[in-house]
Image: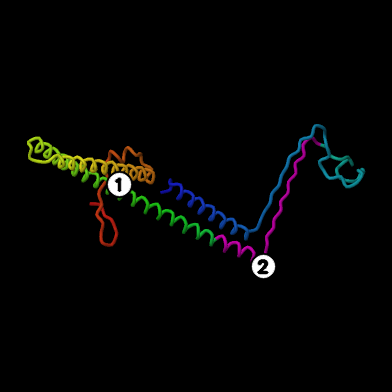
Amino acid sequence: LSQYPTVAVARAAQSRARAEVRETGAQRLPRITLDGSATQYQLPAIVYPLHGFPSPTAAPPGGNPVFDHTLFQGSALASWTFYDFGARSGRTRAARELAGAADAALDAAEQSLVARTAGAYLRVLSARQVLAAQDQRIAAIAAETERTRRLLAEGKLARIELLRADATLARARAERSAIGGQLDVAEHELSQLTARPWEQLTRGALPAVALRDSGDAEPL
């Protein structure tokens, strides 16, 4: 199910909605921001704040500013919003509602895909059975046509009877071609829905199903 495009899109939307729920919930927590930097100078630069002219009695020792080629700086900021008049609560509720809608959309996409797959599966089985029955019908019509041709050769039937038999046989073969086309379409659709190669569906035998009165299906 997860490989089909509609289900994959719905699952991605669900993941996004759940991520938004976590994001809105994280806004209730305190925030800590850390910042750091390192600067490399070609020539020595002042690495301590200079608030006045140096004097022999002031720090740093010796009264001279401190120079260095490398300057490291860091900062930390902590904040927490105690009350925002319900703005965060509203965003959290909205995000949860959207997440619930995404869950429902995913369930609907999966159920729709299951229904489509079951329908394609039953169409394949039905088309195969109809095709087999049509082959038997063509064989019976061909045998009857051959018998008519022999009777015509013996002079026991009019030629119109052979023409009718040939027309019936040609119509049965045309119907078989139409049924074969329906089977081919159903098998390709089932192959797409189940992500199985079409050759496996055409060569392999699919298990038959029996429908209950309640509409359920159980393997035979």
State the residue in front, 147 or 115. 147
Crowding at dot 1, Cα within 10 Å, few <14 / some 14-19 / many 20+, comes out as: many
Kind of residue at badge 2: Phe
Q: Please name the residue shown 19% across and 42% down the image.
A: 138
Viewer-nearest residue: 121 or 14 = 121
Q: Which residues are magenta?
A: 68-95
The single residue placed furthest to the top in the displayed view is: 42
Q: Is residue 69 above or below residue 48?
A: above
Q: Which color mode does the image show? A: rainbow
**Residue at x-position 44% and y-position 54%:** 109
Q: Is 99 drawn above or below residue 63 in the view shown?
A: below
Question: x, y percentage for residue 76?
Answer: 71, 51
Quarter occupied by residue 213: bottom left
Whole-Å distance between the Cαs marked 2 and 1?
Answer: 61 Å
Q: Secondary structure at mark 2?
A: loop
What residue appears at the point 21 percent right and 46 percent down from the top-left corner?
133
Q: Amino acid at mark 1?
A: Val
Please indicate whether residue 170 sits to the left or right of residue 59 in the image.
left
Q: Position of residue 208 (x, y in %)?
A: 25, 49
Q: Which residue is mark 2?
A: 85
Helix or strand or loop: what does disc 1 sit on?
helix
| Mark identifier at residue 124 | 1
The mark lying in front, picked from 2 and 1, is 1
Q: Quadrant of residue 165?
A: top left
> Of the residues under marks 2 and 1, which one precedes in the sequence?
2
